[in-house]
Amino acid sequence: MDERQILPPGRHPHDPLKADIDPIGYALNKIQTSLLWIDEHRSSFEQLRHCDPASAQTELDYLEDSVEQALSHLHRLIELLLAGFTLDPNKRLPKGLVQGADMLRSYLNRRREN
């Protein structure tokens, strides 16, 4: 397969397994989730790095995995968008994306207050 050939929605390993979930919404949800995990692992690492180096290393490993997942889903999202795909109004958005908007807003407000 040509390296630049874009697999259609539903055919890529990073697309949702359920055909009724929108692949663009799915990618956005996975990126959002990964970014929240990245910040959680960063915070845990900061708390542990001086008192428990082994656990801090574990957090760094988790952080690396979360970054890799975010970048993989971002790459897929960019592929879909550049190929001209958009949100499909006939498909569901992931619950985490729909409900996550309020959670994300709250999370950002808490971070700004600290």
Image (tube, rainbow, N blue to C red):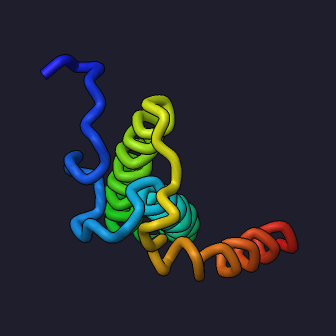
Question: Along the horizontal axis of the image, is 109 left or right of 42?
Answer: right
Q: In which quadrant of the rendered view does residue 36 lie? A: bottom right
Figure check: 26 above or below 5 = below
Query: In the figure, 48 relative to 60: above or below?
Result: below
Q: Residue furthest front?
A: 90
Depth check: 63 or 97 in front? Answer: 97
Q: Tell me the residue at 29%/20% (across/down).
A: 4
Image position, residue 96 (x, y; %): 50, 77
**Of 32 and 56, the residue lying toward us:** 32
Q: Which quarter of the image is occupied by the N terminus?
A: top left
Which residue: 28% across, 41% down? Answer: 8
* Residue 109 drawn at (x, y percent): 81, 73
Q: Residue at x 45, y 44 (%)?
A: 77
Q: Closest to the observer: 4 or 63? A: 4
Residue 97 seen anywhere in this rendered image of the structure:
yes
Instruction: Locate residue 42, reporting x and y percent.
Output: 53, 61
Residue 38 visible from this viewpoint: no
Residue most toward the left? 1
